[in-house]
Amino acid sequence: MTKIGLDIRGGDHAPEAILAGLQLAMPELKANTEVWVYGLSDDLKSLPESCVAVSCSEHISMDEHPVRALQQKPDSTLLRGISDLAKTKIDCFASAGHSGALMVASMQALGLHEGISRPAVISLFPKMNGEQTVVLDVGINVDVKDEQFLEFARLGKAYAQSVLNKENPKVALLNTGTEASKGNLQYQRVYQLLKDREPAFIGNAEARDLFKLEAEVLICDGFTGNMLLKQTESFFSLSQDLGLNHEFLERLNYEKYGASPILGIKGKVLLAHGASGPEAIKSMILGAESFASANFAEQISASSTI
Amino acid sequence: MTKIGLDIRGGDHAPEAILAGLQLAMPELKANTEVWVYGLSDDLKSLPESCVAVSCSEHISMDEHPVRALQQKPDSTLLRGISDLAKTKIDCFASAGHSGALMVASMQALGLHEGISRPAVISLFPKMNGEQTVVLDVGINVDVKDEQFLEFARLGKAYAQSVLNKENPKVALLNTGTEASKGNLQYQRVYQLLKDREPAFIGNAEARDLFKLEAEVLICDGFTGNMLLKQTESFFSLSQDLGLNHEFLERLNYEKYGASPILGIKGKVLLAHGASGPEAIKSMILGAESFASANFAEQISASSTI
């Protein structure tokens, strides 16, 4: 039995959009998957029959101070979910809520994997050949120490192995050119560091090759990764405005593919865009189901740099 | 009379692609525009009649060390052009050649505008409404001091005023979100600096709004700007691969819109992509013509921060 926790009060359009997304996801979930829904008692009245209702007395709003909110609201949907995950009552917790609060709660209640100094958030970018690239960090580590790039490589590889079933994932560094001398001073140092200590490192990759990368894992600081994500959104929105249609463009739509696992913590947490609508929530729930059954913890323990 | 200098030996496909681009550009140039062509004597045999041939004895290859090449090759096409620009024999010089050598030669022979510490390279991004955004820096300043962002704002405004005829251009800072607290530590500091000292600053802009920005000038460090440029190339190439057609997509094609003015130096120099084909060279020559007649120097002198 796979048990997924869902925060019904997370996101700009909660609880309506989350409930609607749950309804969309239910028919596509496997028979042995159970959804635990964390919500206020009113939210839980019209749940699909097979769901487990977890009634909470409060929730954290999008504009609250994360640390203060966590201290003041122990019975919030977000904290109850993370707490049940820590107790292994559920296998994965998914929320479109306050990303800062989710991050802090996850670190406090679950702790970090050995050798990991900070969590990282990944995003999956589509490739022309139908496969996907694991890109990290895409937002929370905007000022990064050189050594964190080694952690990103480890986390990205473990995800590619355990969730995407890639046996020997290759790692590339996002940079302004392929030569070792390219990029700013940090990226020049990091290139050498990866060359010396990451066996799966195959060199720099340029954003111009984003949709046809050789590597399965693309690493960068969270400032640059967030830009990459946002610019991809701009291209999807441009294609909508221009009336262009293609199946591949749909894969750039964060409404469908926006949920990002938070890696590095000892537990499986998925974070979706605050603006998520029902389609994005459905996608988050299905993503949580496949993440829940992956042996990510073993892969990250087995992985190492030199 | 507007006099444009053209380096026939600059670029991966020189001299053939440059000569072909010149042939394409000739019919579209104004009657009072004259093209001075800097090449080896063999290159100059089949020039269009109205061009001025400037015979040089050598040229700088794409893989040479810039400073050494400039010292050893005073009669190269690149140095002769920059030297004639310094002597005001020509109004603008354009090359798809060695960007490092072009940058160093420009700084040495022409000098920098007052208050400018380093040159910057701009790129014009299309807007959905048919207008353009001046984006800088897009490549040469990959490690940037906070104060350089103020210089980027000044240079971008002067270009928008003198070349794009925008009376009161607005400046935005490319960032991961619109709030003042967004971005890495440098971008948080720079936001405050711009707020305090740049009257045209209207706040942060996100890459997701790239094609519908309110600002006419978008500033960022050269590492981030180069990523933005490269990712835009990936979109164009993706749309080609997917067989998508739209006039707007053509405007993302660096083959057509790739020439970038180098701003901050006391002289007008245009740099095109090394891989430029005839269409890109034609575009560079037409761009040089309009840049040559702009009163950029006056605008940059008149501009100031508080």
Image: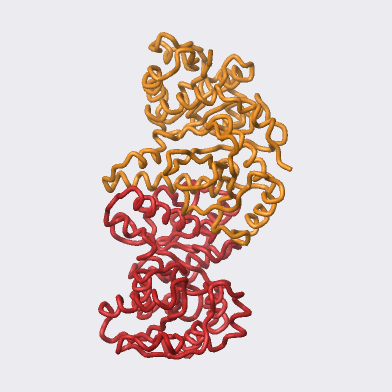
Chain colours: A red, B orange
User: Does residue B171 sit above or below A299 in this rendering?
Assistant: above
A42 and B280: which is toward the camera: A42
Residue B262 visible: yes
With A216 as the anchor, is A192 left or right in this view? right
With B106 as the anchor, is B19 left or right in this view? left
Give percent across and percent down for residue A243. Answer: 30, 50
Give percent across and percent down for residue B76. Answer: 54, 20
A129 and A76: which is toward the camera: A76
User: Does residue A142 sit above or below A8 in this rendering?
Assistant: above
Dividing the picture into quadrants, the one containing residue B20 is top left
A119 and B220: which is toward the camera: B220
Farthest-out residue, top: B49
Tell me the residue at 47%/44% (across/down): B229
Dividing the picture into quadrants, the one containing residue B115 is top right
Tell me the residue at 41%/23% (across/down): B18
Give percent across and percent down for residue A275. Answer: 45, 67
User: Does residue B172 sit above or below A133 in this rendering?
Assistant: above
Tell me the residue at 34%/67% (across/down): A166
